[in-house]
Amino acid sequence: MQDYIDSDSDPGPVLRGNERTVKILIVGHMGAGKTTAVQAVSEIRPIKTEEVMTTAGSGIDRADLPHKTTTTVAMDFGRVNLNEELVLYLFGAPGQTRFFDILEDLAHGALGALVLCDPRHLAETYPILDLVEELGLTYVIAVNEFDGADRYTEERLREVMELAPSIPLVFCDARSRLSTRDALIALVQHLLTKLPEPVR
Amino acid sequence: MTARRRGGDRLVATYVVTGGRSSPTRNTLDQITLISLSSSAPYLSRSDLNEEQNKILGHLARGAQSVIELGAFLHLPLAVIRVLLCDLIESGHIAASGRRITDGPAEGPDRNTLEAVLAGLHRL
Ligand SMILES: Nc1nc2c(ncn2[C@@H]2O[C@H](COP(=O)(O)OP(=O)(O)OP(=O)(O)O)[C@@H](O)[C@H]2O)c(=O)[nH]1
Ligand SMILES: [Mg+2]
């Protein structure tokens, strides 16, 4: 396990520039544990970015107009080198539909999404599932087992959430590197099952 | 990043940084495209570059970086960092690894990539 690098803008292990890069989105409602999960797995000190978004018009070319409504979207991102040639980026992004444009940009070319949810706030996850589906992302639901939260069986959760059997649901502790990694593994395994059978 | 609440001010400032353009005309750089200094970068003049672009080159001197990381280090929104980077590609100072967002839909991940990711995750 790698220690966090805590100088202010330490860029982490040096990249050559010819590595392959892949990304996975970690989405979820407020307080679901997105930031915690990105931190748990990242080898660089996770970076919080704020993307400025205009709520009227498009682009920033009219930014000189007065009373322009803008909003900032906080995103976390982390990075982990999977091998010499392959770098995984993790993006913790808010699941509100009003951030659709930014999420769409992020989702482009992403492997898939991990949808984190706090079992005490299941209903908050429903709109996020719709959103992720609209983005065309393959996803796995990771139920973040908070201390003190009631424990439900997978069966019960599926029933309450009316989940299709084809959507994997796993449990995790977003604070744990291994547990979060295992949730990511579940996602990648699910992605592999969705590929067409290799021709022999 | 405490002094970052002034969205409006920043927008005006970034508007100036990019010379008023908000998006590059060519296909867009993905957030995880890796950017590195080109081999000719040491020989090219930097006198026409703005402060932000010089900062980008400074960061890249330590190694390649993804578009999103450069944006975060420079505290610039993605739309702005993309424009600055595209200009630096054009001027020959930097090179981008293969990946771009084009207008078409993204192809899904292929089996080899997924298997490599899976093996990598298992090793963590
Ligand atoms: N016990 C327990 N606490 C957790 C777990 N995951 C996150 N937390 C705590 O829950 C709180 C919220 O977690 P965050 O990671 O900030 O959640 P978030 O989804 O990034 O929240 P926002 O960015 O505000 O939407 C923090 O205080 C975490 O320490 C977990 O698995 N178990
Ligand atoms: Mg957060």
Image (cartoon, coloured by chain):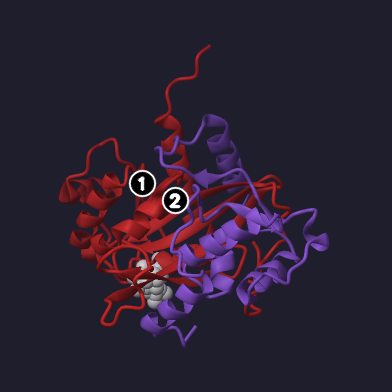
Chain colours: A red, B purple
Q: Which residue is mark 2?
A: A183
In what quadrant does ligand 2 lie? bottom left
User: What residue is at 56 percent from the left and 36 percent from the top?
Assistant: B113
Type of amino acid at the residue the image marks with label 1: Val
The reply to whether residue A2 is in sight is yes
Quarter holding the N terminus of chain A is bottom right
For the point 28% across and 68% down, which residue is it?
A149
**Around disc 1, counting alpha carbons within 10 Å, would you say few (fewer than 14), some (14 to 19), or many (20 or more)?**
many
Contact, mark 1 vs mark 2 (Cβ under 8 Å):
yes
**What distance separates the C-alpha of mark 1 from that of mark 2?**
8 Å
- Using residue A171 as the reference point, say whether residue A69 is left or right of it: left
Percent from the top left, x then y, of residue A161?
Answer: 19, 50
Q: Which circle, 1 or 2, is nearer the viewer?
A: 1
Mark 1 or mark 2, earlier in chain: 1
Q: Which residue is mark 1?
A: A140
Whole-percent x and y of residue A73?
36, 70
Q: Position of residue A68 (x, y in %)?
A: 28, 77
